[in-house]
Image: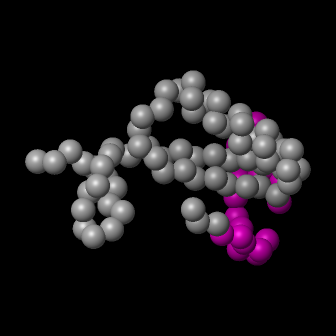
Amino acid sequence: MVIDEYDADNFTFGRNYLGIEHSDDLVIIQITANNTRTVEQKRALYQRLAENLKESPSVRSEDVFVNLVEVLKENWSFGTGIAQYAQPV
């Protein structure tokens, strides 16, 4: 998990995209994961993230921007120069 916080002078984003108005409270969540989830699971994740952040700390659902980056299992190395998830050759 990596969390970055930017002051207003260093946080540039589109105020309006796809008809969704973003405020200064915009939260951007980027998740990198294996490409194993269905579209339905992804939609449920996005909805739940928006609901949880609306509940606490009161972030508008319009200000919850989620980007899911899916990668193949062999694209991970958790250390020691080994692709732990890749099938052995």
Colour setting = one colour
Q: Quadrant of the N terminus?
A: bottom right
- Res. 40 visible in picture: yes
Left or right: residue 18 versus residue 30 is: right
- Please state the horizontal and vertical placement of residue 72, each as a whole percent of the image: 33, 44
User: Would you identify the image quadrant in which residue 25 lies?
Assistant: bottom right
Residue at 16% across, 48% down: 88
Residue beneath the point at 66% across and 69% down: 4
Magenta-tinted stretch: 4-24
Query: In this rendering, would 49 be left or right of 81?
Result: right
Q: Residue at x 79, y 71 (%)?
A: 8
Q: Residue at x 72, y 72 (%)?
A: 6
Residue 19 sits in quarter: top right
- From the viewer's perspective, tell me whether residue 46 is left or right of residue 8: left
| Residue 44, percent from left and from top | 65, 30
Please provide percent x and percent y for residue 80.
Answer: 27, 70
Question: Is 23 one of the magenta-colored residues?
Answer: yes
Up/down of 25 relative to 21, above or below? below
Q: Position of residue 20 (x, y in %)?
A: 77, 40
